[in-house]
Image: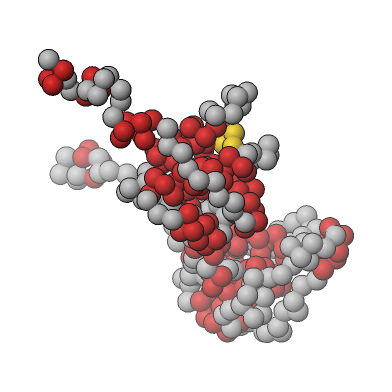
Amino acid sequence: DKSSYTGAHRDGGSPSPSRQRNSVQEVEAHSFGTGAEDLFRGFCGKSGDLDGKGWVKLCRDAGLSNSKFTDTDADLIFKSVVSKVSGRGAGCMTFPMFEEALTRVAAKKGVDVSKVEDALAQCEGPSRNATQADNVRFHDDKSSYTGTHVDKSGSPDASPMRAGATSSEGRRRGSATTPLPSYEFSGAVDRVFRDFASGGSELDGRSFAKLCKDCGLVNRSFTATSADLVYKKVMAGKNRRMNISEFYEGLLHISSQTGLEPEDVEMKVMNCSGPVRSGTQAEPVRFHDDKTT
């Protein structure tokens, strides 16, 4: 009873007209302008042809992909166009194939080809996605620059080495130092100097750094390392310890680097009562400390 036939078995076993239309979807050829070709070249690799990954990215960046035309749809169109050309096992698309693929995109989306052409015209090329590093305060916040990295205007020092000058130029210019102000320190500063020199007349680098710390000169902008650099700068080429006149010079360097006036530095040193002694305190021993025993 042929009246009970269904599907492909109806009408003498021939496929339905709808199946015939879906099996081979012919699209009308359309020639795209030079703008589309330039965009095509922008998404191509070194070979000059467009691979599947680049095609899907082009559809996405041009705004062709959406909920109705997904990346999977774009990939299927790419494969159907490329598979028509024999011998292209690498799966790359030439510009004529690209034009055919675009007409298929328009048919799949159910829009006129001009809509696809407008979308391509608004695309500026491949979008680059990369991880952007977070700001680093000590590098990006120029107000936190200290020492030789800050010039008189408070901006980073445009040293000749950073500007591309030769190394010899950098050494000549870097050796020049800003003149220190003249200032006469009081005798109270001498007392603190002798306290940290253990009653002597010379101060080593470790004691100088401790003096700066105990006097409250060390902070986030002028660290213990900064104090050590000041000591080495003053004592450069001198194979001995720091005397009192060189100590005065070191205090002037601290004043220049921290932005404090020399009298403010002097006041901090004068208010210091001497080296702060820190050590481990032994726990009480009953037979020694408990006198009732």
For this orientation, the residue located farthest to the top is 1
> Which quarter of the rendered picture does the C terminus lie within?
top left
The front one of 163 and 286 is 163
Q: How many badges with numbers are in the image?
A: 0
Residue at 54% from the left image edge and 43% from the top image edge: 100
| Residue 177, quarter of the rendered image | bottom right
Q: As displayed, is residue 47 above or below residue 143?
A: above
| Whether residue 230 is visible | yes
Q: As displayed, is residue 93 above or below residue 64?
A: above
Residue at 74% from the left image edge and 76% from the top image edge: 178
Q: As displayed, is residue 204 above or below residue 96?
A: below
| Whether residue 210 is visible | no
Give the image's coloring scheme: secondary structure
Residue at 65% from the left image edge and 67% from the top image edge: 149
The front one of 109 and 65 is 109
User: Quick check: 142 left or right of 34?
Assistant: left
> Which quarter of the rendered picture does the N terminus lie within?
top left
Q: Position of residue 287 (x, y in %)?
A: 22, 38
Q: Position of residue 176 (x, y in %)?
A: 80, 71
Residue at 62% from the left image edge and 43% from the top image edge: 95
The front one of 141 and 238 is 141
Q: Position of residue 289 (x, y in %)?
A: 24, 45
User: Quick check: 59 left or right of 205?
Assistant: left
Q: Position of residue 72 (x, y in %)?
A: 39, 38
For this orientation, the residue located farthest to the right is 168
The front one of 204 and 72 is 72
